[in-house]
Image: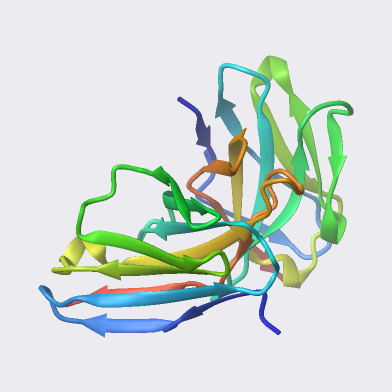
Amino acid sequence: DTAVSQTPKYLVTQMGNDKSIKCEQNLGHDTMYWYKQDSKKFLKIMFSYNNKELIINETVPNRFSPKSPDKAHLNLHINSLELGDSAVYFCASSQSEGVIGELFFGEGSRLTVL
Amino acid sequence: AQSVTQPDIHITVSEGASLELRCNYSYGATPYLFWYVQSPGQGLQLLLKYFSGDTLVQGIKGFEAEFKRSQSSFNLRKPSVHWSDAAEYFCAVGTFRTGFQKLVFGTGTRLLVSP
């Protein structure tokens, strides 16, 4: 079983569209994250949720709206897609009372905006 | 604010040779430091971490890293590289409070292994 799974793995869409990426973890962790990796491989945190509550929002545009229906899921919805949104988006999870720094990452969702 | 610098964008090493990947950090307090590896098409996997204590830390897959406060460095080493080590390596510094962990990553170093 995949510990952190993201769908879809690849997403190609036109500018202006709205799209969602889903993430699920089966590790029993209470904290989940979205990271964005740009074309130069730079990884930057976007959001963090702990027990379904937003903890970190790193000045991400309002077009990005995360939703955590329960602590095992963290979905990312993006409105009005722009060319600059093209990137690989990684979901990750950790346990707040567990091993510090051990984030478990999904395999990434590559978004291409045309 | 924390930051991490990985000065080498890519490094090529012969199989069986030793490896050292450089990482410098900027952080006001005692840092939590990490090395992650990303294989092609995969997510990131934790190799090792440093919080305190012994400045030489051992990780998985035969990797080790040494924390040097005086140089603000946390370089990753491996005595003998295998072809399967070819991947992207990320150094990170972490901030932790109750309920969340925030990692700031460097820009990564791509390791190429030649036969």
Report the residue that reaches farthest toward the left.
A16
At x 15% / y 65%, what residue is drawn?
A: A82
In screen coordinates, is A8 left or right of B98?
left
Task: Find residue B67 and report its horizontal and vertical position in percent.
Answer: 76, 29
Residue A43 seen = no
Displayed quadrant of residue B113: bottom right
Task: Find residue B36 and report its horizontal and vertical position in percent.
Answer: 65, 53
At x 73% / y 43%, what residue is drawn?
A: B76
Residue A92 seen = yes
In screen coordinates, is A112 left or right of B69?
left
Q: How is the image coloured?
A: rainbow
In screen coordinates, is A114 left or right of A72?
left
In screen coordinates, is B87 left or right of A34?
right
Image quarter (top left, top right, bottom left or bottom right) of the N terminus of chain B: top left
Task: Find residue B10 and report its horizontal and vertical position in percent.
Answer: 54, 54
Tell me: residue B36, above or below residue A71.
above
Image quarter (top left, top right, bottom left or bottom right) of the C terminus of chain B: bottom right
At x 60% / y 60%, what residue is drawn?
A: A93
Displayed quadrant of residue A76: bottom left
Give whichever of A92, B23 is nearer the camera: A92
Tell me: residue A54, above or below residue B40.
above
Tell me: residue A12, above or below residue A44.
below
Task: Find residue A102 and report its horizontal and vertical position in percent.
Answer: 70, 52
At x 71% / y 37%, what residue is drawn?
A: B75
